[in-house]
Image (cartoon, rainbow, N blue to C red):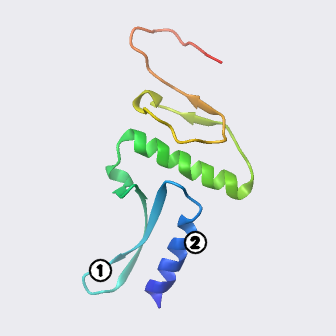
Amino acid sequence: YNKEYMESVNNIVSKHFKYIKFKMFNQLINSSLEDTCEIIYDGTPYPDCNTERKINAGLDIINAISNYYGISAPVWIDNAETVSEFIATKAQTIRLEKVRGINELTIKF
């Protein structure tokens, strides 16, 4: 029963996300289940993802929360220079990047 319940919860939660999935339980050696909540991005656990995937996983979570509550807020993205392609978001994004040779803050609109 617990396994079916956890898989049902996992499916309900995961349907709100486009790029990430959640692993809601671990099956132990003795066949019992252990509660967990691990983000999986394209088959890779979140802690093992590179910075680009971590940022895009965060954007996917922000998109899901924004869609669920019908709101949108500006999103600050630090280390944006490490990302070659951002996933689409309805939110305004403010990207912070380090550019070699530039020692002054520049604001572009």
Mark on residue 28? 1
Helix, strand or loop status at disc 2: helix
The answer to whether mark 2 and mark 1 are in CB contact below 8 A is no
> What's the residue at 43%, 45% (across, down)?
54
Question: Badge 1, how many Cα within 10 Å: few under 14, some, many 20+?
Answer: few
User: Which mark is drawn over residue 12?
Assistant: 2
Identify the mark nearer the N-term, 2 or 1: 2
**Image height of 62 relative to 16, above or below:** above
Tell me the quadrant of the picture where the C terminus can be found.
Answer: top right
Q: Position of residue 5 (x, y in %)?
A: 51, 84
Q: Percent x, y for residue 17?
A: 55, 58
Q: Horizontally, is 60 left or right of 3 in the view?
A: right
Please tell me whether residue 36 is drawn above or below residue 4 in the rendered image.
Answer: above
Describe residue 40's horizontal placement relative to residue 48 as left or right: right
Residue 27: image location, x then y, percent: 33, 79
Q: What residue is at 57 percent from the left and 65 percent from the top?
A: 15
Q: Is residue 66 above or below residue 83?
A: below
Percent across and percent down for residue 2 are 46, 87
Label 2 – label 1 distance at C-alpha: 23 Å
- In this view of the protein, which residue sits in the foreground, 30 or 19? 19
Amino acid found under the numbered disc labelled 1: Leu
Amino acid type of the residue tagged 2 in the rendering? Ile
Residue found 58% across the figure and 41% down from its top = 88
Q: Nearer the viewer, mark 2 or mark 1?
A: 2
